[in-house]
Image (tube, grey):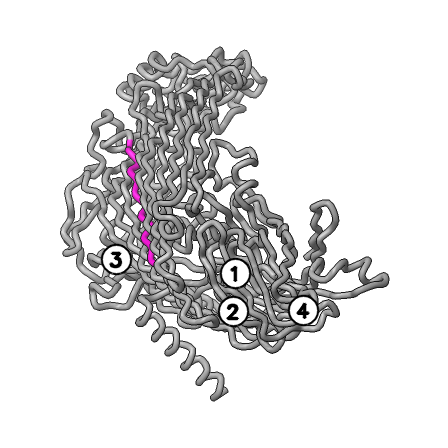
Amino acid sequence: MRSLSRLKTYFILASLALACAAGMAFGQAGTSTIRGTTIDPTGAVIPGATVTLTNPGTNFTRTQTSSETGGFSFELIQPGKYTLEAEIKGFKKRVLTGVQALVGAPTDVRIQMEIGNVSETVTVEAGAAAVAVNTQDASLGNNFVTQQIVELPLEARDTRTLLTLQPGVTRDGYVAGARSDQSNVTLDGVDINEAQTNALDSTVLRLNAEAIQEFRVATLNPNADLGRSSAAQVNLVTKSGTNAFHGAGFEFYRTKGFTANNFFNNRAGVDRVPLLRHTFGGEIDGPIIKNKLFFMYSYEARRDITATNVVRDVPLASMGRGELRYIDANGAAQTLTTDQLNQIFPEARVNPIGVAVLADAAKKYPANDFTVGDSLPGQLLNTAGYRFNAPTPVRLNSNILRFDWNVNSKQNAFVRLAKIYDLTGQAPQFPDTPAPNTWSHPSGIAVGHSWTVNSRIVNNFRYGVTRQAFSQLGDSSANQFNFRFVFQPYAYSRTLSRTTPVHNFADDVSWVKGSHTLQFGTNIRVIRNNRINYAGAYDNAVMNPSFYQAGGNVLSDPVSAYLTGQGLPDVASVSETQNAVSALLGRFSQYTANFQFSNTGELLPPGTPSKRNFATEDYDFYFQDAWKIHPNLTLTAGLRYGLSRPVYETNGYEVRPTLPLGEYFVNRLAGAAAGNPYNEPITINPSGPVNGKPGMYDWDKKGWQPRVALAWSPSYDKGWMRSIFGAPGKSVLRAGFGMLNDYFGEALATFFDNNNSMGFSSNTTIPANTYNATTRLPPLFTGLNQDIRSLPKITVPGSLVFPLTKDMDMGERIENSLDSNLRLPRNYTITLTFERELPKGLFFQAS
């Protein structure tokens, strides 16, 4: 135990020293490895051979001497096609061309020398494929190279649609049981995740098909250098220029003639949704200074003239006359007039102001779809659907520019810039209401430097910043009013703007020592989430039958009593009757007042948005050893450590329960078992470093993640075993174990801030069952500009005084809070895999 503790200490100190020296760091994202063995015609290893790796396109060169076991390893190189040359006295010079270095996946090469004079040369085309047998570790996943990315059919030419084309990955990005928000996507070694949602299919930067050279999606058991979280680890790299000029251009045009109408549009007499899509762009790359400086530029754009088919609930003209229609027990449609309803509900009565709003809606938005609402074929009741095609234009623009520089024979550098300008149209509530469009303008910068210290040691540094930036425009800046299940005049979407810069500081060191390839590094992410959100700036009121006493029975029971008293058949459509009665009475059975406070606790005026800057830093360190025990047997073992700072708000807008909710529920259980109810109130206090308090949740410092993998490639010269396993390097048996963590942070913090009913953003919602239709009447709707904070049971708070608590009035509330004893979920992955390369480009894998 003492030696293990020392090992942990040395590991952390070494990683921290590296971070300080190199400017901090990251795992092996965006790079590749070519490893191999030099052997003679009998299969015996050849030590001391000079092996040279060359990229013919850029004149990049590295040289090594094969070890005493005949091994060589070129680590942290740019993915692409290379030439390998091996020479030693007594053997002909061997040249392998077209050796494919795949991103995130080691390429294993056997160089078989022929006896002869070193002045003689034997040249062989390697012909490595994108799907090759992985003989080095236990990771599962596939590589996609340029040809696949460019030639596979892609909807709107978006490369992100290819990321889920892997065994074990769903279209929504769930990976072998792991959550979709636990994926990690890098471009050129720099994080491009959407920091708040982290979903696999919503990266910050759109990936231009012509600009992406290749990518790999590792679905299970990544090595310590790469695996940060439990889901997919995706490495993408952009193309670099070469000594020859290359270019490509494309244009795809889709006309309206290829779009069919749907059944519901045809039935409602609505034209088919138009779709004119124009996707175009191109790429050019080449030398600026031959063998020295190269460039690549890509532009891709999309223009959609289209619409979204929308159907909204609207009242029929009968509701605009203050009438209630229902289905009786005999299945016939019946009508109750305003006078009859006023007899049924003498205390509440039909609200003429609400009826006027419904009448105007019925006139402006005449129902044309009777598959929604409460109407039945041939039996018009109270509501139906208004179906229309809402224009939702799309204008997308994506730019990627990259420069590569061969500084000298030992150093290489690159810069990659990305900028996007997008407009995505959203469907409005109705044709004459504003459309809540989204403007998106993210950007990204990546800078890399590779230094070949000597033939055995390589350092690879990355810095990058990926900045998410968008504005979702709302369609209303007023209080929300909703005739539930009948009519809502606006979508009441609220404006949200967000900028989320994520800085990456990244470095890997690789040291080839004999038959061992040692690698260590660190990844530090600095994340800021700046939000301006109007979601809680306005109040809302709903005519919700479910919030009435007894879940709305106080609305339908009097109707039933009236009908039976008149000797008429009872109501059969109870739920639909409750919905319509609630709208016609025009009273607010549910309403919420939202309050925003300054960071000093002062109540802000209505209409003031919440402005937050959530922040966190992630620290990852790793060490691993790839040990070539034998040319066909590799053991890879590593240890990764992840430490994520609890998310905090940089201006002090942060609270937490004084007692962790986990402890609260434990106390409740203990009290129940002892027969002593535990009813201590939950109170809220300021938290976070700005307030000099503990964070929203506690640090979790147990982020140790060991990994181990064993890969054996059978090698048989003849017999039935060769028939099964093929030639050397054509099959492999691999086993691996990995321990990984899930990560949470930005999404958790923003959800808690938006939904917490106590704190700097808070709200008061009246409990269900507060009102009935006789003795406790809900407040009356008086117009679409009504003040909600003046309604009964809403108390406008003064300045905040901590600790905060809510009265124990036994109200049936729905509340949200946070357990400060949260711990990172841990995942254990065990894999056993057999792979076999078959003739004619076929490949078999069973895991």
In the displayed structure, 214 sits above or below 259; it is: below
Give the residue displayed 43% in from the left and 60% down from the top. Answer: 743
Asked whether 486 or 150 is in front, the reply is 150
According to the picture, the residue beneath numbered tag 3 turns out to be 649
Based on the picture, tell me whether residue 467 belongs to the magenta stretch: yes
349 above or below 104?
above
Relative image position of residue 528 (x, y in whole percent): 28, 54
Between the residue at mark 2 and the residue at mark 3, the CA separation in whole angstroms equals 51 Å
Q: Where is residue 535 in the image (x, y as percent from the top left)?
A: 28, 40
Packing grade of label 2 (10 A; few <14, some 14-19, many >=20) is many
Could you tell me the amino acid type at mark 2?
A: Gln
Residue topped by disc 4: 39
Task: Report the amino acid beneath label 1.
Answer: Leu
Write down the residue under mark 1: 53
Q: Main secondary structure of the magenta part?
A: strand
Considering only vertical position in the picture, is 776 above or below 810?
above
Decide: marks 2, 1 in contact (CB < 8 A)?
Answer: yes
Mark 2 and mark 1: Cα distance apart in space: 8 Å
State which region is magenta. 463-474
* Sequence-wise first label, 2 or 1: 1
Query: Is 215 inside the magenta-drawn segment?
Result: no
Sequence order check: which comes first, mark 4 or mark 3? Answer: 4
